[in-house]
Amino acid sequence: MSQPEVSVVIPVYNEEEVLDALFSRLYTALDELGRGYEVIFVDDGSRDRSVAMLREQFQRRPDVTRVVLLQANAGQHAAIIAGFAQARGQRVVTLDSDLQNPPEEIGRLLEQMDAGHDYVGSIRRKRNDALWRHVGSRLMNGLRERITHIRMTDQGCMLRAYDAAIIRAILDSREVTTFIPALAYVFAHNPTEITVEHEERAAGESKYSLYKLIRLNFDLVTSFSLAPLQMFSLVGMGVAGASFLFVVYLALRRLIIGPEVQGVFTLFGIAFFIMGLILAGIGLLGEYLGRLYLQARERPRYLVRAVLDQQGEKPAAKKKTARKKTASRKSTSAKPAGGEAAPSGNATDSGSDDA
Ligand code: UDP
Ligand code: MG
């Protein structure tokens, strides 16, 4: 396989119900583009028939298909990075496997890249998800816009295109927990956005529980901003200042009017409010500290079990925990025909329930 113009990276986690529909629409759309492409599926530790179906698809189109099998569920973003480590295209497009991102839109993303943009984001024209997801993500979008330097109209849509230079920068980043569209934005010098269609999930269910979604959003906020911590310091100072004034007022009142015994419940109210504030502050500190801990451990953020490419199936190389920096480079440039599978990514396990 000569170097393709576009690598399409797709994470797959228990998606047996949608894969057939995805295969037929995706390859049709890509064949029509008339650009050299490769599709890299990353199986994120599926327990259903997904792996078998990916193998079959690989056999049908081995010239333009590669499959990365991860050892265990590493989370959507880590899985995408595992795909990036294998990508050989000058441009890389990411997309979900559930057909919420229509593959027919890939051509429009690439046109923007032809126009000189190195990052093409996307805005969902009409989002087709549960209502609570809309509301929650609108709030998070607004918060992210305020407290980070990342400017995106719609952070949640994964249908995006990146220049290979941005992909290299992402691979060089050793962040434990991350949010790829935001991280890529940090490295982009000429980003743009287009509006794309958004469909309902073709089949199956969302792989994100409320808990997983909250964690992902914490990843986004903590990876790109210290504002929450700073805000807490400010609120802390505010509360301390107000309490001081309150004490002065009580002291004066004691001298002028006499002792006060009523208002016990008011006091409880204030005390509980402040206790809540303190607990939230400690929790928030924990979010940052926990991520720091994950980072410090430097565990691989995903483990590759095998890579299927034209050279046949390659089990992951037995090169211990490779410092990915060199490993992934070698696998993309020095051995273009598939070569050895990069055994692992750099330290992180954003998807695992570690924290
Ligand atoms: N996904 C994954 N690992 C996970 C969760 C999700 O690879 O731990 C993949 C999933 O197969 C899909 C994409 O990430 O291709 C988006 O997931 P999903 O559609 O469930 O999320 P939603 O659209 O509900 O946000
Ligand atoms: Mg989806």
Image (spheres, rainbow, N blue to C red):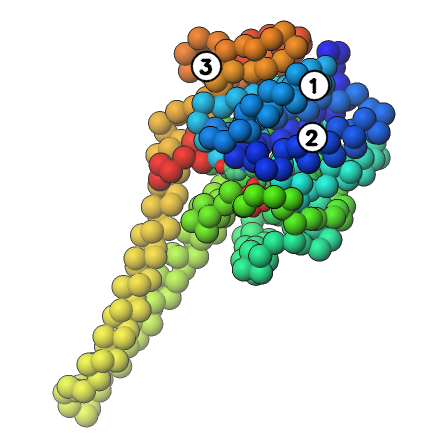
Of the residues tagged 3 and 2, which is closer to the observer?
A: 2
Q: Earlier in the sequence, mark 1 or mark 3?
A: 1
| Residue that mark 2 sits on | 23
Question: Would you place residue 132 above or below residue 287 in this image?
Answer: below
195 vs 15: above or below: below
Residue 172 showing in the rendered view: no
Q: Residue at x 56, y 23 (%)?
A: 52
Residue 40, picture quadrant: top right
Work out whether 93 lies above or below 306: below
Q: Quadrant of the C terminus?
A: top left
**Label 1 to label 3: alpha-carbon separation:** 32 Å
Dot 1 corresponds to which residue? 60
Residue at point 58%, 57% (across, down): 130
Q: Residue 278 in the image: state x and y as whole percent.
A: 30, 59
Residue at 63% x, 7% y is: 311
Residue 44, position as x, y percentages in the image: 51, 29
CA distance for labels 1 and 2: 10 Å
Q: Amino acid at mark 2?
A: Phe
SS at circle 3: loop
Please state the total of marks drawn on the protein image.
3
What is the three-letter code of the residue carrying label 3? Ala
CA neighbours of label 1 inside 10 A, class few (<14), some (14 to 19), many (20+): few
Dot 1 and dot 2 residues touching (CB under 8 Å): yes
User: In the image shown, does 178 or 226 lie closer to the viewer?
Assistant: 178
Query: Which amino acid, mark 1?
Result: Arg
Q: Specify whether 38 is left or right of 96.
A: right
Secondary structure of the residue carrying tag 2 is helix
Which residue is labeled 3 in the image?
322
